[in-house]
Image (tube, coloured by chain):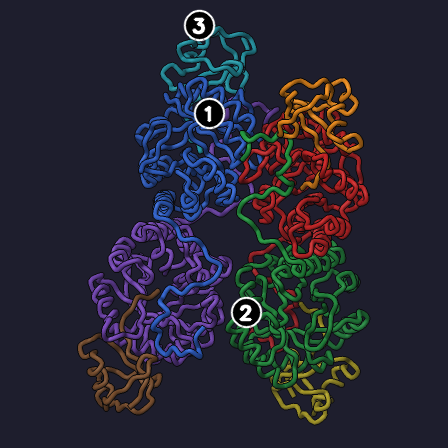
Chain colours: A blue, B purple, C red, D green, E orange, F cyan, G brown, H yellow
Amino acid sequence: MKLHLYGFEAASRLLLGTAQYPSPQVLHDAVKASGAEIVTVSLRREGARERTGQRFWELIKELGVRVLPNTAGCRTVKEAVTTAQMARELFDTTWVKLEVIANDDTLQPDLFGLVEAARILSGEGFDVFPYTTEDLSAADRLLEAGCEVLMPWGAPIGSGQGLANPAALKSMRAYFPETPLIVDAGIGAPSHAAMAMELGYDAVLLNTAVAKAGDPAGMAEAFAQGVSAGRKAFLSGLMEPRDMAVPSTPVAGTPFFKLDNAS
Amino acid sequence: MKLHLYGFEAASRLLLGTAQYPSPQVLHDAVKASGAEIVTVSLRREGARERTGQRFWELIKELGVRVLPNTAGCRTVKEAVTTAQMARELFDTTWVKLEVIANDDTLQPDLFGLVEAARILSGEGFDVFPYTTEDLSAADRLLEAGCEVLMPWGAPIGSGQGLANPAALKSMRAYFPETPLIVDAGIGAPSHAAMAMELGYDAVLLNTAVAKAGDPAGMAEAFAQGVSAGRKAFLSGLMEPRDMAVPSTPVAGTPFFKLDNAS
Amino acid sequence: MKLHLYGFEAASRLLLGTAQYPSPQVLHDAVKASGAEIVTVSLRREGARERTGQRFWELIKELGVRVLPNTAGCRTVKEAVTTAQMARELFDTTWVKLEVIANDDTLQPDLFGLVEAARILSGEGFDVFPYTTEDLSAADRLLEAGCEVLMPWGAPIGSGQGLANPAALKSMRAYFPETPLIVDAGIGAPSHAAMAMELGYDAVLLNTAVAKAGDPAGMAEAFAQGVSAGRKAFLSGLMEPRDMAVPSTPVAGTPFFKLDNAS
Amino acid sequence: MKLHLYGFEAASRLLLGTAQYPSPQVLHDAVKASGAEIVTVSLRREGARERTGQRFWELIKELGVRVLPNTAGCRTVKEAVTTAQMARELFDTTWVKLEVIANDDTLQPDLFGLVEAARILSGEGFDVFPYTTEDLSAADRLLEAGCEVLMPWGAPIGSGQGLANPAALKSMRAYFPETPLIVDAGIGAPSHAAMAMELGYDAVLLNTAVAKAGDPAGMAEAFAQGVSAGRKAFLSGLMEPRDMAVPSTPVAGTPFFKLDNAS
Amino acid sequence: MRIVVNGEVTQTAAATLAELCTALGFSEARIATAVNGDFVPEAARGQRMIAQGDRIEIVAPRQGG
Amino acid sequence: MRIVVNGEVTQTAAATLAELCTALGFSEARIATAVNGDFVPEAARGQRMIAQGDRIEIVAPRQGG
Amino acid sequence: MRIVVNGEVTQTAAATLAELCTALGFSEARIATAVNGDFVPEAARGQRMIAQGDRIEIVAPRQGG
Amino acid sequence: MRIVVNGEVTQTAAATLAELCTALGFSEARIATAVNGDFVPEAARGQRMIAQGDRIEIVAPRQGG
């Protein structure tokens, strides 16, 4: 079964960021290796001479993937809304990864500004992908505001710590059985991504763990497999962990078995 | 690069157990889906009427995989040695997964009996795959005894808890950089298997998590991907987790940036 | 140094709940054993015949402790505000543990309703103790709203899981170095309470772990010591955990030491 | 109920190491503050001029505590046995903390050498306190060898990581309900010590976390309370952690309750 | 007149909240009150008239966490 | 006239935002613009007059996470 | 003669382990054998005499973890 | 005669371990001794002859963990 996001259907459940790669070629190879159909991008001040943005745009077009512009670095509702409006024109898409940052040490979302900005942007016809936390009261309001997708963090952006609070992520999944939920940020290894998918999350969005890997393309492929592994496991019904050991090999018929050494 | 175990070369780094499947057909499908080239088996008392073992043997032959007989249920050196000798004749292989069990609640190895049995069997020309713990003093003696592979547990057999002591498994990997190390037992989900491979382990052996899954064949495929994901990640150079958040999107050029709201 | 909460000075850094005890006598003994100077209470519908509340009030008065009425069970701002107003008259105190619950499975706070109710009640002269999460954007607004204390959860109420997200609690402590921070809810054992204090939290509030213990008075004393132990450790400067082992006993002068077995 | 170790009765369940303190005075104050009745010591090569050992011996005598000499740094059975014999004469005690080290990075015990040395020393009338791991097969043999106490590590010596494998420590406690079990090494904070005691361990032995604290005497007192807190909690019957939240405040009688907002 | 006291339908002849509390036997009791979701301080109960269908809360101290 | 473009003080003779973009060499470039914090769509740049002290943002696509 | 086969007391007239296996219907079966805890290879079954009270194990392949 | 005391090569004229300890100034000191890896109790030091190349350990109490 495919992933549905605002009517867009994706076979891949891995969304990839485009920042921090050692070179455009490595970025290109990593995106290809990841199988990602959606990549995040941003917008930044352009210098007429450097024309950095123009060259980056060419690169993205070649990749033939769907772009999800973010509002990274925005600290206020106003900054986020204007940035989203500029992004819509620049990337010719109604999609926006909405970030309203509360704090520079944790880069965690300002849940209040996030909900307000989400309401405004949804009203203007944007398809909002809110970067949020596992907080259920914010999640409820984001859905009321018109969001059809939620993107809770796994851990602080770029920390690579994995899932800091799996119990809270479980509650969120249980509380929103139907809403597409994407773990965004904090994922440092394929095992983290697999775990998120085993919890029933619909997709994973990451950037640093691939871009900063020794071999980004190889790591991108590793994450693609990790995400797929976790998804398949979730669909196949995972065993419940048990406190005690249980023999896998049958006990009946064990040679040399006598009652006196029976357990 | 392939996995080398006593001169046998395997492309797959997932070893699968053959017990606890709902039916022979499901076992067959799970082994195929796992891509495993090595499966564990055991020997048990045979009844002339039932001929259970004869039918199981036909099934295994069809699979065309390498078999690794175990000594599951053995509590003494003598039982383990005789069981290994019977297994060698029965399965026509010098390979043996050596289990000498210390305790029925945890099914953990008796490290002392294990080393003694490994010494005897290696002397008789067996290729011993010892089911051990992450203890380094036992590992040293198992290698002295002639073992070329070590199989530390992840957690108690059948518990599905994953890696109970990752720090100790890391030490073991660092202490034995060249020896093939296989995490055996306790793996409950692909994320656990991926984590073991990310730590640099050479392979993973499991049974219950696949056999007891809602869809064993689907879960077998999930584990195959999880193991491959972890291996690729290890080879591609994982990022180091960091305590603090680090922006992935470039900070330079952020619109609306003024010195007074700089952080 | 003592704990300061809205001008009240407490020597004890353990706040105790008064619910779920097997009998009034056991509650009385537990409060005494805990050394708590502040206990939480609630208000509920009174039946003229039973007069349950009247008897409970006598019991509390005998204890001679400061009461902190809660708004447990309130799901809306309106319910919470009116409950707080009734509590102020009933208990003759401006203190209120403000709870606005978002969800019945996790009993986590509705951060948005919480901030709104906190603003209203602070405006009416209440001293608000908000039951919140480790979210920094809610914390900022609670302080703006007039709160001088924050009470983030450790884990879901009554779960006894301990600190579900220590990294987030660390960030909160670092972000609010001066504000009194009390871990409220989820504490199941003295080790959890000690850990919260070791992170630099100012106090711990709990109920179930004591009330549901086999011996509540004994457990109350255990928690008093655990809280004190954690506080002392924080003030005494905890060592940093290290990845590798470091000999405690001096290496120099080890007998039988020869260069050839030096490490 | 007091702690019984080879017939010695101790009220305190905290054993303290004497190494790494900034000064003899600080060591003295820390031991006093800890309330420890047993301290570990070692023996090292003595220079006639410095007479370091002579001064240390005076210091220890003043403390009026029971000494437990260790064999720290010994890598072979022979070294450990001779060191124990010298210690017996030097400290005039049959007690010995037996360490046979397998590996310098983890300082973990060589379980095989440990059992052999324990057998020899018990035979010579020593009261052996073996520094071991949570391995049950080694534990069984240590008891057979004559040990009446077991001291499994919490984590590598000096690492301060706490309990690396709580599940294994639980198994050990369950498997040896009667044997005095002391968690030795790896404890970094009072919360770790409390957790060990909550698991039912009989005592805790530590050194670095106190000696390297900013204020060793303050930290020693903190650990004394943490150990006592954990012990009291164990005796008072800890609640079981629960997956879901459970209201502590009674639900019945909640004001404003209507069926339509009942959960 | 039919009102709802603490969630239960009740018949009363009381004109004010104060009379109601007395009629219900709460004269000396330590209680607090609300009518239709709004807090009514003790001092105001005498003036607070009761109307058909009012939802009245009468609460007292209780254990809490 | 002194304005601020992308955070840097700039002298310009351009009357409109469109003229400014051309003057700065962004004629064909894929850019988006804002004046004093408000988004100005491409189509509106011709009518958007520029005044002394305006804070103008001219942005383009960039890598993002 | 009374012996124990796979943990169960059995009467047999077989003189050797080979005869016993045949008598029990294991002629063509893929099995391995042990007597009183010691492995007896297939080739040796013919010479291995059976005595009263011998504990005999006859095992075959089975599922394992 | 050349021996090794606590890991350092030493010249001595002492015939016995007791003499050596005195010569080295350990007469009253609280020490324990070993020769070539074997413990030598205080009482036996007088009879324990020292030979060329002996490895001698002289230890005293020290801080320990």
Q: Quadrant of the C terminus of chain B?
A: top right
Relative to F41, D4 lies left or right? right
Whether marks 2 and 3 lie on the same chain: no
Residue F17's spot in the image, x, y percent? 46, 10
Q: Quadrant of residue D229?
A: bottom right
Compared to A72, does B160 lie above or below? below
Measured in 3D between alpha carbons, the distance from the residue under mark 3 to the one under mark 1, in whole angstroms, is 24 Å
What SS does tag 1 mark? strand
Compared to F48, does A36 lie above or below? below
Disc 1 crowd rating (10 Å Cα; few below 14, some 14-19, many 20+) is: many
* Residue under label 3: F47
Relative to C38, D121 lies left or right? left
- The one nearer the camera, F5 or F44, is F44
* Residue under label 1: A44
What SS does tag 3 mark? loop
- The amino acid on which the numbered mark 3 sits, given as a three-letter code, is Gln
Q: Quadrant of residue A255?
A: bottom left
Return the chain for callout 1: A
Measured in 3D between alpha carbons, the distance from the residue under mark 2 to the one under mark 1, in whole angstroms, is 63 Å
What SS does tag 2 mark? helix
- The amino acid on which the numbered mark 2 sits, given as a three-letter code, is Tyr
- The residue drawn where x is 34% and y is 48% is A236
- The one nearer the camera, C90 or A29, is C90
- The amino acid on which the numbered mark 1 sits, given as a three-letter code, is Arg
- The one nearer the camera, D194 or B134, is D194
Whether marks 2 and 1 lie on the same chain: no
